[in-house]
Image (cartoon, coloured by chain):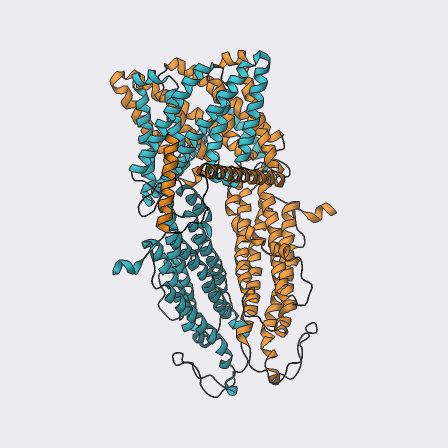
Chain colours: A orange, B cyan
Amino acid sequence: MASEKEVSNGVEWRIKIADGSSERLVPEANPASRLLLGLKSFVVGLALKVWKFLQKAWDLGVDDPRKVIHCLKVGMALTVVSLFYYMRPLYEGFGKNAAMWAIMTVVVVFENCVGATVYKSLNRVCGTFLAGFLGLGAHSVASQSGQRFEPIIVGASVFLLASAATFSRFIPSVKARFDYGAMIFILTFSLVSVSGYRVDELFEMAHHRISTIIIGTSLCIIISMLVCPIWAGQELYTLITRNMDKLTTSLDGCVEEYFKDSGSVVESNKECHKKLQGYKCVLISKAAEESMANFARWEPGHGPFNFRHPWQQYLKIGSSMRSCAYCLEALNGCINSENQAPEYIKKHLNNSSLKVSSNSSSVIRELAITIKTMKKSSNIHSLVGEMNSAVQELQNDLKSLPKLFNPPSMPEADTPENKKIEPISRTMVKMPLMEIVPLLTLASLLIEIATRISGIVDAVGELENLAEFKHASNDKC
Amino acid sequence: MASEKEVSNGVEWRIKIADGSSERLVPEANPASRLLLGLKSFVVGLALKVWKFLQKAWDLGVDDPRKVIHCLKVGMALTVVSLFYYMRPLYEGFGKNAAMWAIMTVVVVFENCVGATVYKSLNRVCGTFLAGFLGLGAHSVASQSGQRFEPIIVGASVFLLASAATFSRFIPSVKARFDYGAMIFILTFSLVSVSGYRVDELFEMAHHRISTIIIGTSLCIIISMLVCPIWAGQELYTLITRNMDKLTTSLDGCVEEYFKDSGSVVESNKECHKKLQGYKCVLISKAAEESMANFARWEPGHGPFNFRHPWQQYLKIGSSMRSCAYCLEALNGCINSENQAPEYIKKHLNNSSLKVSSNSSSVIRELAITIKTMKKSSNIHSLVGEMNSAVQELQNDLKSLPKLFNPPSMPEADTPENKKIEPISRTMVKMPLMEIVPLLTLASLLIEIATRISGIVDAVGELENLAEFKHASNDKC
């Protein structure tokens, strides 16, 4: 009956709609079959969505198999700790809640990179220990002060310490190192001071809890270090050097692209475009760099890095690279401008511009090699010198640019040998300033980029000193 | 005796050191008094450090009192929930662990802004519910399959689901919305399936746990919404509009600074410098914007914003603002270049450059007003038109720049009335191109900035449509 009524209502409603709008797109159909059709399309749509999602997940896994390995590691750690507590004898020894704390520790502490796992582990252990100690004190004071004052003392101590610890999480230096520890502190302190147990019961509990937490964290640290470890420091280092490579590719590519003859063979356009956009990775990697540097300081020595490797210096290098990338971004905008300089003027600056960009790239590439090999470069100074002389040459070419338009005032052809300037008609005395503005901007931004590269050179030099890189030449001897 | 021995050891050691290094900077002193001195300086140093830390914390609190309020809110929520479970009757009704889960929920879920609290609360409740359901299933299947297969089934199910859930946290769309939920899912599933309880015990436990979690999350949501709420959406909106203001101040300031007569009154330099650097906030606010937009979508309607306010669009506006800021950064570099154009050439472009920058700023300011008032601007089109015509004027001025150096070829003074060019000596025929390159770069970057501002205009226009802003003029009528 009910369904019949609904159906008839549905028909009525449809008819009303049809009357109201006086147009009907769907031909008359049985409501039941329409429902079926809708359901079918819904199911198909859902299946498609799920399929797409799974495909995306698959691509993600194929793209970075280390993510899959991390998941298997988490699964392994959890299974180990679960089965460890599943065995009855241990289980009864540690009390019913012990398993819970071990599992919770593994779930919460196990992170993608070693540094983050160590950071959370140490924070968890220290936070629990400190808060447990203070909580026991608060609890015993409260329980000795009589039925009436007990809740007041407990409430006041929880309120004060929780507020203070929460506030400390806003302080940048605390946030960077002890954010998680502060949270655990609040949690443990509240739990211990509020719990209705007797003090001697609490001692036993605290003993169990600390030991389970230590077992859980040790397991996490061991697994994350031994099974295909992902080191935050190594990641940071890879990110910085890869960004340097991207920066050079983009810089070279942009300038070449601009000076390229329109007649030359066009590269596979999409790939080329992707290459040119590499500098955008530099623009957006600030947050990633910072979090990696934060975690890296918790890591023990690994690979070529000591325990106290100056990770913070990589942030400086990253930020000086970003300041270059800003200019490159502006340069890219100017290159795509509508106004384009005439070919013969472009040709005048062609060689020196390309030289500046290629020399700048060489400097960055050398810096990347310095970081990669962790050896002081012997020829960075000469490369910087070459870059500066290329800048000087570009400036000279800029100075001589007006001569292109004032041939009568300088009859003698005093241009350098390697720059052949086509004979320009004598009628051409007015400079097409508007058209050459993008070209001049390019030159000026190239010069600015070269200046900013000195910033990267300085930052890498500081890293060399802080991390005590050896001379590359020493090894060759 | 022991202390005597230590002292004599200390003396021996000191003498050895003194012999080895054969130099002694500190005059002979009693070891005990030296120890005291060292201790004193250590204590003083520590006290100074603590004092500085406290001062920094105080400044932080004074700077943003809302942080202090947040801390008090957390303290309040924790105290309420603690005392709630401290009352014996409730306490025994819910079981000994109930208090723990409520406290844990409050500590973990209570975040600075409402959106984050709601996000974590919903994720926690849904994750616990789903995982509890699946865990009960796994647990009952395992317990029915006999002593031998039980650990295998439990281990395998924990391994599979924990790995899968961990992997899902890497998928960007899941990470943005359900990261915390996935963690809670792993935690609850492991706890339930591993626990040694009977299934009927588990049902009761699940009931208690879900109810305590719901009580805890509701308390958090209520307190965070009712007591001085901090809305992520409001924060995002404030950040975007404040960044717009900073962008205009920097843009105006930079160009004015460049064209300023060296004789004019110098503003309080530090403050002025700070103003000019405002665009740097735009450069670095990407991460903050993204996290706020992520949280904002969990928030109910508040103030002028609906539940489904298009927060993602603010990210687009932010990114188009950043693309302007990149140019501004490059411009700032060029302005500080060593080469400076002669005054009379600067004067030629002075008016039109200032016009472009001030018109560009007006456009951004109008956009900021549009967002602030949430009303469609009636004169944004005319402002964009003015900006474009200012750009055109600047381009014309650039075109006419060569005339400054070729007075003989154009005897008639066909310059616009509003630009008075000083009479230039006839000897000046060669263009000082090198010196005017920064000026030309400035002009070119200004034009580029104006182009990119169109991007902001488009993004704000999209926001107007998506959020269905009303016309400002409608209200005035």
Q: Which residue is nearer to you in this view: B393 or A119?
A: B393
Q: Percent from the top left, x then y, of residue A231?
A: 59, 37
- On the rendered structure, is B291 left or right of A406? left
Q: Name the residue furthest right.
A: A477
Query: Residue B341, relative to residue B212: is it above or below?
Result: below
Q: Which residue is nearer to you in this view: B421 or A81?
A: A81
Picture residue at 43% right of the left edge, 41% below the top: A172
Query: Residue A271, relative to residue A212: is it above or below?
Result: below
Q: Percent from the top left, x then y, of residue B451?
A: 47, 64
Query: Residue A155, relative to residue A50: is it above or below?
Result: above
User: Residue A105: in sight, yes or no?
Assistant: yes
Q: Percent from the top left, x then y, of residue B439?
A: 49, 70
| Tally of marks | 0
Q: Which residue is nearer to you in this view: A12 or B68?
A: A12
Q: Percent from the top left, x then y, of residue B166?
A: 54, 32
Query: Residue B23, relative to residue B282: is it above or below?
Result: above
User: Residue A389: in sight, yes or no?
Assistant: no
Q: Which residue is nearer to you in this view: B366 or B87?
A: B366
Image quarter hosting the C terminus of chain B:
bottom left
